[in-house]
Amino acid sequence: MPSRGSKAQTERDPVRDDLTDEEIRRALEAILASSEFEGAERLQSFLRYVVETLLAGQSDDIRAKSIAEDVYGRSLGERGDPMAVVRVDAGRMRRRLADYYSNSGKDQTLRIHVDPGGYVPRFEVLASEQKDGGTRSVPRFWLRGAAILGVLVVSAGALFIFMTAQAPPDGAALSESVRKQQAVREALFSTNPTKLQAVNLANEARPLMFPVLDRDRLQAVRGMFDRAIALDRTYFGGYAGAAQALGILAITSPPGDEKQRLFQEARARADQAIEIGPDEGWSHSALALVAFAHRDFDKAVAHSTRAMSLAPDDIHVTNFDALFALFCGEFERAIASAKRAQLSDNTSRRFPYRSVLGSASYHMGDFQSSVDRFNEAIRRGDPVSAISIGYLAAGYQRLGEHERARATMLLLEEAWPDYPLHALFRTLFAEQGNAEEVLTAINEILGQQADQ
């Protein structure tokens, strides 16, 4: 490539005159070698490409099309949407850069940014007093990065948990978590059988929350948690479960007084769960859902991270973490949590982790894997919602299987007539661009149906 010095600097070539190529490359290599970018080979290649292209004086060539072709080796004529992959990866890269400068790169005075709306990197030099004064607050994205690393660290142990959970329930073969649950139940039965009834009822209600967007089901589940509270007002689980049911009902309610009332009740129940069980993962998972319902996505991820650390073997906490990560745009974390839930699932319950894997695969541009995951979920009797079928139809559309896409949309409309699919997608996602990636495909299908 030609050197930067061989081309006159333009407004779109944001390299400061006082920076050398060597300084910029040192800053780049520090980023690529950091823990925040560890294992993210595609994002590393993306960032290196845009920086080196800029240093070569070719900033005008830094576009989604050139990145798709030069970094990913994909052309616009191929199946799928390479441009969508670039957009998704750009968002992931920006979040990792924010993590880096909040953590291992917090002392770096030369910073590389890729601002939203484009892919040309920008370079910032912080004065020492600005750096000292600007990096003392709690980093916004620290918890997200730590959660992803935590999931990866424990993933190796998940297989062991899965294998031991399959063993027959005879003494030493039981896993530690199962032995603990049995001991708790025996103690409750001998000292407080009413509390045991509350615990059993709440544990029966928890898996019934999936699929989470089925309002009629959630109303019934809420009643079960309310009954658990009535049986024992000192048991945290009744309040945590009620908070989650109320929070989901609030999310799926239209704007108005009823929605606000559900929000307030959900928050009150979550606060009671935390007061009674502050060291319980379920309590913090309930707080995460309430924050998510309020569209405070950073708090949702932070509370869910704490829930995961307190209850790493709780499959319900893990499934909700996967859902929060998905709708917050943390697709790699969503996949990690969903796979962890899958490895530890030795129950006959119905969980959404396969649907999460399908959804995250869609946003990462792997449409075939997305379709395969959703079809597997349907075959296995996993929770199926209008959102899941919408993803499946969109996946077929992106694969060019337009007839199957239209047939899937007709099934959706038959099973969920007048379902507010567009509004719900936009409500669930933190970043509207992620919602539009699915809705654009769905609109294409609807347009094709109207033309016939």
Image (tube, rainbow, N blue to C red):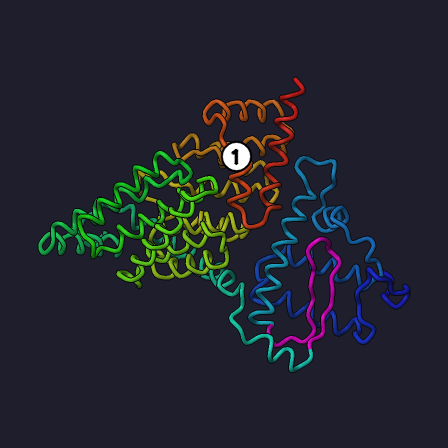
Residue 145, percent from left and from top: 52, 62
Magenta stretch contains residue 315: no
Residue 186, percent from left and from top: 13, 53
Task: Decide: few, some or many residues near mark 1? Use Cα within 10 Å; few <14, some 14-19, many ≥20.
Answer: some
In-front residue for pair 251/392: 251
Q: Is the stretch drawn in magenta largely helix, strand or loop?
A: loop
Dividing the picture into quadrants, the one containing residue 268 is bottom left
Which amino acid, mark 1?
A: Leu
Residue positioned 31% across, 48% down in the render: 242
Residue 445 as seen in the image, left or right of residue 278 = right
Establish if 439 lies above or below 120: above
Dividing the picture into quadrants, the one containing residue 364 is top right
Label 1: which residue?
A: 421
Tell which residue pokes out farthest to the top in this image: 452
Residue positioned 30% across, 57% down in the render: 273
Q: Quadrant of the N terminus?
A: bottom right
Residue 216, percent from left and from top: 35, 34
Establish if 369 lies above or below 113: above
Residue 148 as seen in the image, left or right of residue 309 = right
Q: Quadrant of the C terminus?
A: top right
- Secondary structure beneath dot 1 equals helix
Q: Which residues are magenta?
A: 106-126
In-front residue for pair 94/375: 94
Tell which residue pokes out farthest to the bottom in this image: 129
Magenta stretch contains residue 119: yes
Residue 382, percent from left and from top: 40, 35
Residue positioned 60% across, 69% down in the render: 101
Tell which residue pokes out farthest to the front in this image: 257
Dividing the picture into quadrants, the one containing residue 399 is top right
Establish if 278 lies above or below 382: below
